[in-house]
């Protein structure tokens, strides 16, 4: 556990069993509030991938238990050896504009320990991800009605 500015604590769980049940609920709720409700994408966020071996959850937690931002890392099979993906990057509306997502992405990249990383960035965020070293790695595509661009690092 690392402490960062804003009195937020960076938490890392390398298994869902390491996440307190109320925190896991808050992570799931935040993902639903942003991806399903705010972005109007009706899809099954709890897709089973959080349960896979090697799945890692990172989040910033406020002193009151609020999940300020969250991300998951998955192992991807096929393609390059050791390939990982970073996804479900989400920030609570009350914590946006403070650089928390950037700190979380940096922590996720560090957690990947130099392994190649794939992301499916919402296309309007490609320049934002490029600042971490990601480069476009394929053609833009629609996912749940939102343009996405595959990007890779390493």
Image: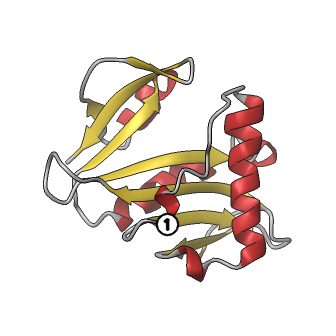
- Is residue 13 found left or right of 27 in the rendered image? left
Q: Is residue 146 above or below residue 95?
A: above
Estimate the x, y position of residue 31 in percent, counting from the top left. 68, 47
The residue shown at (80%, 63%) is: 66
Residue furthest out toward the right: 64
Using the image as rendered, state which of residue 15 and residue 99 is in the foreground.
15
Q: Is residue 1 above or below residue 127?
A: below
Q: Report the label total.
A: 1
Estimate the x, y position of residue 26 in percent, counting from the top left. 76, 61
| Quadrant of res 153 | top left
The residue shown at (76%, 31%) is: 38
The residue under label 1 is: 51
- Is residue 27 found left or right of 56 in the rendered image? right
SS type, badge 1: helix
The residue shown at (27%, 67%) is: 113
Using the image as rendered, state which of residue 107 and residue 86 is in the foreground.
86
């Amino acid at each position: 556990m690392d402490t960062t500015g804003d009195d937020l604590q960076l938490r890392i769980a390398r298994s869902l069993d390491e996440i307190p049940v109320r925190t896991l609920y808050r992570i799931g709720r935040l993902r639903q509030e942003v991806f399903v409700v705010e972005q109007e994408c009706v899809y099954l966020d709890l897709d089973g991938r959080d349960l896979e071996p090697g799945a890692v959850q990172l989040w910033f937690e406020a002193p009151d238990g609020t999940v300020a931002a969250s991300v998951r890392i998955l192992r991807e099979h096929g393609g390059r050896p050791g390939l990982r993906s970073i996804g479900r990057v989400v920030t609570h509306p009350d914590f946006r504009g403070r650089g928390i997502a950037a700190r979380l992405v940096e922590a996720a990249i560090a957690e990947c320990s130099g392994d190649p990383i794939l992301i499916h960035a919402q296309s309007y965020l490609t320049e934002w991800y490029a600042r971490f070293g990601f480069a476009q790695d394929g053609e833009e595509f629609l996912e749940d009605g939102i343009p996405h661009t595959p990007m890779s690092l390493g």
